Image: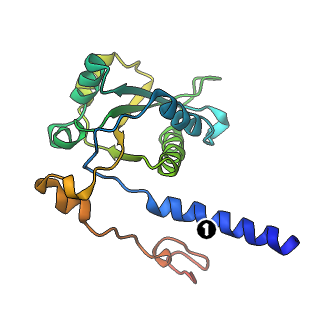
Amino acid sequence: MENQTIDTSQDLAQIQLDLIKKRQSPVAFSDQEVSKNQLKQLFEAARWAASCFNEQPWRFIVARKEQEVLYKKVLNGINPHNQTWAQNAPVLMLTFAKKTFDKNGKPNMHYMHDLGLAVGNMSAQATAMDLYLHQMAGIVRENIQADFDIPDDFEIVSAIALGYRQDIEEVPEELKAREMKERTRKPLTEFVFDKSWGESSF
């Protein structure tokens, strides 16, 4: 019985790792709707991310396509190169992080790190729900500031397109090469050092 429990734990760990490996950033989204309840699940995952002093400095503006005015304002904050494909996603988001601590007003040196953890949680949850996030550094900060009047204490960080992946047979030709591009990652030996800097046994 004890061995069975260990095997089950190992199986669950492998399932989780497989989900993480499945995560991708597509540029071709289907028009299938993402419900408000699904979004609540994603933000619940983000809510439970770790953060320095439990500050939880992350903030999101989220727009579903049926919210036409808000969706256009969010899209306006994405650079034209990314707009060409992001405009097809059923959900668009903008991300922000508070640069100082609430409790004392001092600089929080880890605000972007903590936002990244929250989005990482969201990304893992999305993958479990067969949804995909594509995060974008290509944003137009002045447009976002003008359209949403972001407080000075918040950094405008990124945009996110969210939705279901489009069937590869339906992907436009100009996007197909990007969708089919081989995914690569550095080997562990390049970033995990357990001897001295640059030396790894992994």
Residue reaching furthest to the left: 174
Q: Nearer the viewer, residue 63 or 99?
A: 63
Q: Which residue is mark 1?
A: 14
- Colour pattern: rainbow
Q: Residues within 10 Å of mark 1 (few under 14, many from 20)?
A: few
75 is higher (above) or lower (below) than 116: above
- Amino acid type of the residue that numbered disc 1 sits on in the rendered structure: Gln
Q: On the picture, is 13 further left or further right than 123? A: right
Q: On the picture, is 22 further left or further right than 148? A: right
Q: Nearer the viewer, residue 107 or 181?
A: 181
- The residue depicted at 48 percent of the width and 43 percent of the height is 119
Residue reaching furthest to the bottom: 201
- The residue depicted at 36 percent of the width and 40 percent of the height is 162
Q: On the picture, is 2 further left or further right than 45? A: right
User: Quadrant where the N terminus lies?
Assistant: bottom right
Residue reaching furthest to the right: 1
- Across and down, in percent, residue 25 comes to 34, 53
Q: Residue 22, can we see it?
A: yes
144 is higher (above) or lower (below) than 118: above
- The residue depicted at 63 percent of the width and 42 percent of the height is 50
36 is higher (above) or lower (below) than 165: above
- Across and down, in percent, residue 89 comes to 29, 38
Which quadrant of the structure image shows residue 137? top left
- Across and down, in percent, residue 79 comes to 19, 37
Which quadrant of the structure image shows residue 158? top left
- The residue depicted at 53 percent of the width and 28 percent of the height is 100
Q: Secondary structure at mark 1?
A: helix
Q: Residue 108, can we see it?
A: no
Q: Nearer the viewer, residue 190 or 198?
A: 190
- Across and down, in percent, residue 127 comes to 47, 51
User: Quadrant where the C terminus lies?
Assistant: bottom right
